[in-house]
Amino acid sequence: MTSADPRIERTRQHVLACARELLLAEGAEAVTFSALARQAQVSRNTLYRHWATPEQLLVDLTLEYYVTRIDDTVTPAGIPEFLHGLRKNLATSETASVLTALIARAERDAGTAAALQRLAAVRKEALARITGPLSDAQFAALIGPLFYQAFVARGRLDEAFVDELVALTTST
């Protein structure tokens, strides 16, 4: 979602950068238009021109992070590298904060639910480049344990966990 006018795009990127800073410093609940307008030194009207709601801004922030930073820069050689990369990403405070907020909001906001579906599709496409076509069940079986460990069990999500997961996956 970029504009042909470079000034508008610069403003959008500046606001997203400020939103990331605010998110990391204070959490997803702190990313309000009032706080973000102060942080980015723009008017709330400027924010509303780009995003109708703070939720939409968080969706854009998340999609931009996954699509431009993860998939364009990381080309894993196999399933173990893919899972280790995903683990590393899930272990960052930015990812954890944004995904937790999006998951909570997806029940009441169709745009947020669609963003989560897009994130899943991005990850599935990246894995399919390694494995070939995957069913939803195959994809969920591979990445589900990482999300469970990170967001439900709140347990250790280290390299040893992924190594054990890879061993289980390749032994069946």
Image (cartoon, grey):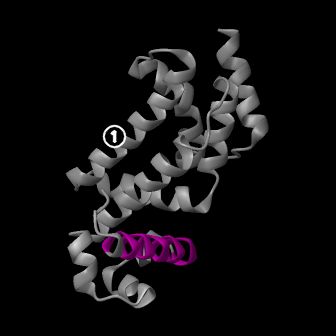
> Which corner quadrant of the image does residue 52 belong to?
bottom left
* Viewer-side residue, 133 vs 165: 133
Q: Residue at x 34, y 76 (%)?
A: 7
Split into 4 quadrants, where in the image is the C terminus? top right
Q: Residue at x 51, y 31 (%)?
A: 126
- On the question of residue 154 being in view, the answer is no
Where disc 1 sits, the SS reads helix
Q: Is residue 134 above or below residue 158?
A: above
Split into 4 quadrants, where in the image is the N terminus? bottom left
155 sits left or right of 136 in the view: right
* Viewer-side residue, 14 vs 83: 14
Q: Residue at x 55, y 46 (%)?
A: 70
* Range shown magenta: 8-26
Q: Residue at x 43, y 55 (%)?
A: 64
41 sits left or right of 72 in the view: left
In the image, residue 163 lies at what x, y percent?
Answer: 76, 29
- On the question of residue 144 being in view, the answer is yes
Pointer 1 residue: 117
Q: Is residue 157 above or below residue 94?
A: above
Q: Residue furthest right?
A: 160
Q: Is residue 150 above or below residue 10?
A: above
Q: Main secondary structure of the magenta part?
A: helix
Q: Residue furthest front?
A: 5
> Which corner quadrant of the image does residue 79 belong to?
top right
